[in-house]
Image: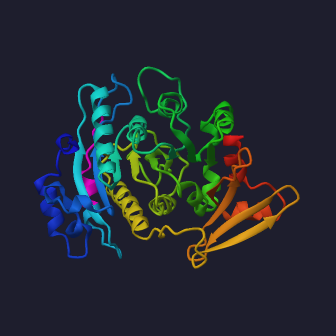
Amino acid sequence: MYNDFLKPVSEELQDFAKSCNSFALGQAIKFREDVIESDEKSNDKIAIIGVTESRSKQKDLIEDVDFSLVRTQLYELQMGNWSIDLYDFGDVVYYDDKAETEKVFREVTNGLIRDGYVVVILGGTPSLGYQQYRAYDEIVDKVYYLTIDHKLRLGKDEAQTTENNYLTKIISNEPFNLLDYTNIGFQTYFVAQEKLDLLDQLNFDAVRLGVISENVKEIEPYSRDANAALLNLSSLQGSDFSSSKNMTPNGFTSREICALTRYLGFSNKLTSLYVCDYIENYKKLDHLLISQMIWYFIDGKNHRPEIKSFDDTQYFEKIFVPTEGYNYIFYRNVLTNQLWIEVDNTVDGERKFEIIPCSEKDYEQALNGEIPNRWWKYFKKFY
């Protein structure tokens, strides 16, 4: 049972949570001791866990990773208009053998997802992103993984999984169940052109920091079908966040990162978010920013749109866009204004099609007689 591998939240922190005002998260959040049989049958719940492993490689020094001050700030935040149950299950502590930490982390994440929790993970080393991904083995046949990072982690495929090669491991190791991958916020001067070319050949996406900063809403179509997401705190600009091992002068602002986490929460399919590359610098503003990011993710989950049939005309309008080369079919949710596009997968005369998320930009491209980017990326995966 995964509970056996989790160190519960301290009694002091639990008492602090209960001492918060009646509108605070601390009053609503449940701890491991509060889980009852009836809770486990619910599919509308969020579990927060920490993982204190900070080593990228076995030989690295252990950094100080403690989430008590982050939790303190989180518990004091005020509740939104929410209905989802919230839990804090405590931390996965690191083991002397990093491989043992990886195994336990994967089992805990897998167990929580199987029990119907959306898992918010606070963590140290980004290398555990590979274990987060592998936690979906035998849960989802094809995984869509999304990262928010200033780099592409396509380092050399060594025996050890590190913060620089975990994406290489995801792509190259069996079982090969990666259907789609998107990186949000890469900074061009940190990424070799060969890595961008490789992602393009694999029909995966990498979106520059400037594109998202110009319009944060651009992340929404990418995150809509994602099963799991990793948010590297080093993707924030150093002036807004400094409790990371790999700070940079450029990056997302505090407002942008909160908007991004809300869009991640808005996804109906995303069941885990790993917030990583945190080290304890004892800076209240950093603790508060992480807690606000989690707050926005929870808010997004509570206000995510209901899943409805595309044939339901009460919720969707079907839009035909004829062009010289192809007749595109779009679906627009009349309540949320979200767009999808139909991709024809007809084989040997048997009519098949997929309906995939797209953006307003894709729709405008079709209207202008151009091939929509999202349609073309998906089409190339199968032809």
Please state the extent of the stretch shown in magenta in the rendering: 63-73
Report x, y in % for residue 282. 29, 49
Q: What coloring was used for the rendering?
A: rainbow
User: Is 373 positioned to the left or the right of 121 in the image?
Assistant: right
Report x, y in % for residue 117. 32, 55
Q: Quadrant of residue 43?
A: bottom left
Report x, y in % for residue 270. 45, 54
Image: 168 above or below 275? above
In front of the other: 217 or 178: 178
Task: Specify the farthest residue to the right.
Answer: 324
Queried whether the magenta region covers residue 67, the answer comes back as yes
* Residue drawn at (32%, 72%) of the image: 83
User: Is 38 positioned to the left or the right of 299 in the image?
Assistant: left
- Count every numbered label the image shows and give the total: 0
Queried whether the magenta region covers residue 268, the answer comes back as no
Task: Specify the farthest residue to the top.
Answer: 159
Query: Quick one: quadrant of the N terminus?
Result: top left
Task: Specify the farthest residue to the bottom.
Answer: 314
User: Is 256 positioned to the left or the right of 321 in the image?
Assistant: left
Is residue 148 visible to us here?
no
Report x, y in % for residue 348. 73, 44
In front of the other: 306 or 155: 306
Query: Quick one: quadrant of the C terminus?
Result: top right
Is residue 163 visible to us here?
yes
Q: Quadrant of residue 332?
A: bottom right
Image: 242 above or below 25? above
* Residue drawn at (62%, 56%) of the image: 356
In front of the other: 288 or 35: 35
* Residue drawn at (26%, 25%) of the image: 97
Q: Quadrant of residue 212?
A: bottom right
In front of the other: 343 or 119: 343
